[in-house]
Amino acid sequence: MQESPTASRSQREGDIVRIGGGAVNVTENQRVQGDVVSIVGPVNIDGEVTGDVVAVVGGLTLGPHAVIRGDVTAVGGPFKRDPQAQVFGRVNEVGIGANGQTVPPRFNPRNILLGSFASRVGTLATTIAPEMPIDERNVPW
């Protein structure tokens, strides 16, 4: 009788979700019973994931022993798939930027988010603030 490929793998119940701060790694001898999601960080899979794998603005690498039972989605980062890797769902690769290009290597999402946010707050404040009449008698110059 042949041993099933998941019999010798250590199992983790539940999703793995990481926002910034390093790579998510599922090694050859590991099995994740759930999804793997990383935002602004790389994902390296060489084991089994029973759910979906998503990498946003980080690289996604599927090694030769990778078995993904759900979908694989890479948004705004490089996607590398070994020919031996198995994906039973859909594979989605989404570039962001002009003409679908991926994010430049020196892209810093915090600058985009904070810069955009600060700009929008400033625009909102100047739009909704009433014009204050200037009383020339109270101007010090």
Image (cartoon, rainbow, N blue to C red):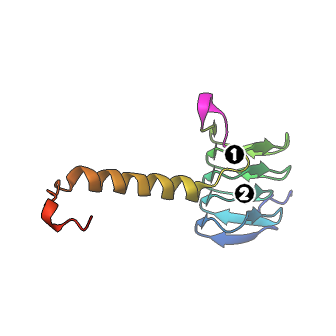
- Looking at the image, is 18 positioned above or below residue 105? below
Which secondary structure lies at badge 1?
loop
Q: Residue flagged by tag 2: what amino acid is it?
A: Pro
The residue under label 2 is 42
Q: Find the distance from the CA under tag 1 to the CA under tag 2.
A: 9 Å
- Would you identify the image quadrant in which residue 20 lies? bottom right
- Does residue 73 sit above or below 39 in this rendering? above
Instruction: Give the image location of residue 37, x and y in percent.
Output: 61, 58
Mark 1 residue type? Gly
Residue occupying image coordinates x 59% and y 55%: 109
SS class of the residue under badge 2? loop
Q: Is residue 38 left or right of residue 116?
A: right
Measured from the top left, where is residue 68 in percent x and y? 69, 50
Q: Residue 84's image quarter?
A: top right
Quadrant (top left/top right/bottom left/bottom right) for the N terminus? bottom right
Identify the residue at horizontal 70%, vertical 43% (top origin): 104
| Foreground pick, 113 / 33 | 113
Label 2 near label 1: C-beta < 8 Å? yes
Residue 126 is situated, as x and y percent measured from the top left of the image, at 27, 53
Task: Mark 2: give few (<14), some (14-19) or many (20+) Cα within 10 Å.
Answer: many
Outermost top residue: 99
Residue count near mark 1 (Cα–Cα under 10 Å), binned few <14, some 14–19, many ≥20: many
Residue 120 in the figure: left or right of residue 37? left
63 and 5: which is toward the camera: 63
Q: Which residue is mark 1?
A: 77
Mark carried by residue 22: none
For this view, does 46 lie left or right of residue 43? right
**62 lies left or right of 102:** right
Image quarter of the C terminus: bottom left
For marks 1 and 2, the one nearer the N-term is: 2
What's the magenta region?
Answer: 97-103
